[in-house]
Amino acid sequence: MSLTLLLATLGLLVQGSSGEITLTQSPGAKSVSPGQTVSISCKASSSDVYSSNFLAWYQQRDGEKPKLLIYAASTRVSGIPERFTGSGSNSDFTLTISGVQTEDAAVYYCQSFHIINSQDVFTQ
């Protein structure tokens, strides 16, 4: 039995005088078997993610609202299983799911926060 994890960015930064930053996740989709470990990469087109760790990960199961899993790159939200681990800094971040369970079949999003030209900007 296998399950599919779908990956996507939460959005792009608004374009303007501060420019544009994009988040790229890979792989786009992955089929894994329960018990396997999977790593999801999130890369920003700029390395100025504020304090090098203002990166969040969300999980959205079919028909449900997105749920925050990880914030500040590596801090798990209370109640989130330990199999979800966040790591990384600057422009490269990773979400690792160790021992994937069937209930982990979902879409996973990353979101970042930047300060550009002294303006606070979130991906959206």
Image (tube, grey):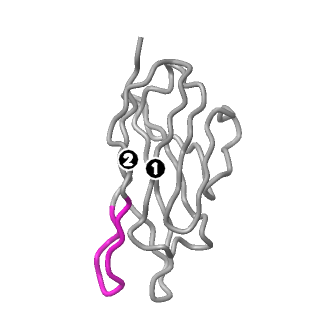
Q: Main secondary structure of the magenta part?
A: loop
Query: In this view, which residue lies farthest toward the top?
Result: 1
Per the rendering, the mark at residue 26 is: 2
Return the x and y of residue 35 as percentages of the image width and height: 56, 20
Q: Is residue 112 left or right of residue 14?
A: right
Q: Is residue 24 above or below residue 108?
A: below
Which quadrant of the figure contains the C terminus?
A: bottom left
Using the image as rendered, state which of residue 29 and residue 8 is in the foreground.
29
Return the x and y of residue 21 as percentages of the image width and height: 36, 71
Q: Earlier in the sequence, mark 1 or mark 2?
A: 2
Return the x and y of residue 39 as percentages of the image width and height: 50, 40
Q: Residues within 10 Å of mark 1 (few under 14, many from 20)?
A: some
Give the residues drawn in magenta, as a range: 12-23
Label 2's element? strand
- Distance Cα–Cα, label 1 vs label 2: 5 Å
Q: Residue at x 41, y 64 (%)?
A: 123
Q: Is residue 51 above or below residue 106?
A: below
Tell me, yes or no, whether the highlighted magenta stretch contains residue 13: yes
Q: Residue at x 31, y 87 (%)?
A: 17
